[in-house]
Structures are given as C-alpha cells and as structure tokens.
Amino acid sequence: MRVTISQIKEMKQAGEKIAMLTSYDYSTAKLVDTIDIPLILVGDSLGMVVLGYESTIPVTMEEMLHHTKAVVRGTKHAMIVGDMPFMTYHISIEDALRNAARFIQEGGAQAVKLEGGVTVAEKVRRIVECGIPVMGHIGLTPQSINQLGGYKIQGKSPEAAAGLLKDARALEDAGAFAIVLETVPAPLASLITQKVKIPTIGIGAGAGCDGQVQVINDLLGSFADFVPKHAKRYAKLSDIMSSAIGQYYKEVKEGAFPTAEHSFAMDESVLAQLS
C-alpha cells in the first residue's frame, strides 16, 4: 500500500517529521522508495536539473507526464506527487481539472501540486472535490519568477508575511492536504506551521516546518551548475561520475577495456567453418 494523505496528516498530529524528495526517473525513484521516504515529488525542477532549461517555465505537461510515469513504475510505497507545470492550471478551472486528472489517470500519480495561494484556492477546491489530493506551494513560487523579480526571500515585510499566512489558510480551507513553503524566513514558516492544521513542507524555510523537501540532484551533488543556499550536499556524485567516466575513456583508448571478463566466447569450430 502506498502512503495516503491521511497518514501524512497524522504525522503532523503526532509531531513526526516528514521527509520528501524529488525524483525524475525509474532507477532513482526505486532507490528513494527503498528508504521509505513517504512523499516523492516529480517536480518541474526537472526542467533545470534534467532537461537543462534556465527555469521551470518551459516545462510542458507531456514532459511532466513522461517523468511521472517512470517514477511511478519505480515505486511501491511512496505517495507520488505530480507538479503541475506553468499555465496548466491558470487559465480556467476546466484546464486545471483536466490536467490534474491527467497526472492521476495517465501519469499514475496519487496527488498534484499547484503554486499559489488565494489566487488558486478555488481551483484547488474543485480539484479536491473531484477526488484528487492537492499539495499547495507558497512563498517563492518558481513559475512566477519573472513577476517576483528573481529568486528572493518571500514574506519579509509585514504585508508580505500577512499575505503568506492568508495564502496558507486559503489553501487549507480549499482542502489541500499539505503546503510547501519555499524560501520563507524561518520564524514566519514556524508561525504558519502553527496556524494551520495541515502539514507544512519546507525548502529554505527553516526547521520549524512539519517536514522538508529537497531536489535530489542537490542532495546528491549530481547537479553542479550551482548549489542553492537551502541545499545540503550529502554526497558529491558529480566528482565520482567524472572520475569514472574519465577512467572509462582512458581504458578504451589504451585497449584495456573490454577484457575477457566483459566479453562472450563461442565454439572455435564455428569460426573454422567460416574461414
């Protein structure tokens, strides 16, 4: 059985911290699932760390579904949350419902994530009413990066802080089962966590949230373009991968690979018949 939204909510009530990670492919998701991570986000961050875009904005619905299917195939335990990409839920409630349903029907996800608070609350409500669990996302919302003027801390002024609290409450009232708080001052994130009954999942929002989410490429050090302030590198896979690739290149050039160990034999009499 996969983790359910009821179990996620119960973790907050019990004071149990919630670990969430992104995954974008079968083999990585399978590894994450063996650790019993309860939530896996197929984030539109794949646009940057997998597809090489400059932001998440170019990511399409088809790309998200492609990667979501792979992650679902690699997992049995975690709840898979599909990240709805830019402009797939903004134009109308009908668009939001149709694209959310695609994540569930075609992608095999168990929930979807939307960026925004008050402005998307009614769409969240309608999606939830149709039986699709929704995770909210407020604070720094990467799909609005052009409007926000860059990757900046959100909620520092009294007005902005009040707005984020209002957003969180609107998402809770609309039926969201959890809320991602991104790049929000730690004291504000703690306050929001106390004010809402649903779990908060922080990324660059301090330890006071009910859980944490990280981009797995940042955690593993396989994405070397830059390291966000909120990320902790638990490994440096880019160095290990570079070393291994370099060794392979060297051995091929020198004729040291492949050896008999990596080759297949045959009956010499067959070759004799060909001469």
Image: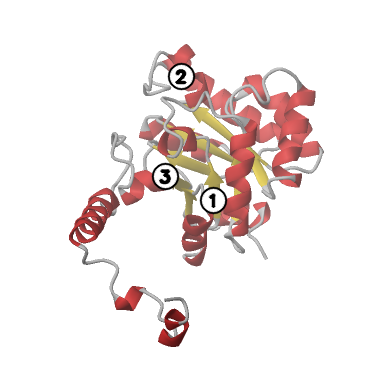
Residue 139 in percent (x, y) is at 47, 27
Disc 1 to disc 3: CB gap under 8 Å: no
Q: Which residue is mark 2?
A: 145
Q: Which residue is mark 3?
A: 214
Q: Based on the displayed image, in which of its 4 quarters is residue 13 positioned? A: bottom right
Vertical arrangement, residue 259 with respect to residue 112, above or below: below
**Which mark sits nearer the N-terminus, 1 or 3?**
1
Residue at 58% over, 38% down? 196
- Residue 200 in the figure: left or right of residue 220: right
Q: Amino acid at mark 1?
A: Ile
Disc 1 to disc 2: CB gap under 8 Å: no
Q: Which residue is mark 1?
A: 40
Q: Residues within 10 Å of mark 3 (few under 14, many from 20)?
A: many
Residue 151 in percent (x, y) is at 38, 22
Quarter that holds the N terminus = bottom right
- Residue 154 in the figure: left or right of residue 107: left
Vertical arrangement, residue 115 with respect to residue 265, above or below: above
Q: Residues within 10 Å of mark 2 (few under 14, many from 20)?
A: some
Disc 1 element: strand
Mark 2 → mark 3, Cα distance in angstroms: 19 Å
Query: Is residue 135 at least partly visible in the picture?
Result: no
Question: Which of these two is toward me, 79 or 245?
Answer: 245
Q: Amino acid at mark 2?
A: Ile
Residue 181 in percent (x, y) is at 48, 34
Disc 2 element: helix
Q: Residues within 10 Å of mark 1 (few under 14, many from 20)?
A: many
Q: Based on the displayed image, in which of its 4 quarters is residue 79 positioned? A: bottom right
Vertical arrangement, residue 189 with respect to residue 140, above or below: below
**Which mark sits nearer the N-terminus, 1 or 2?**
1
Residue furthest toward the front? 275
Mark 1 → mark 3, Cα distance in angstroms: 10 Å
Residue 191 in percent (x, y) is at 46, 34
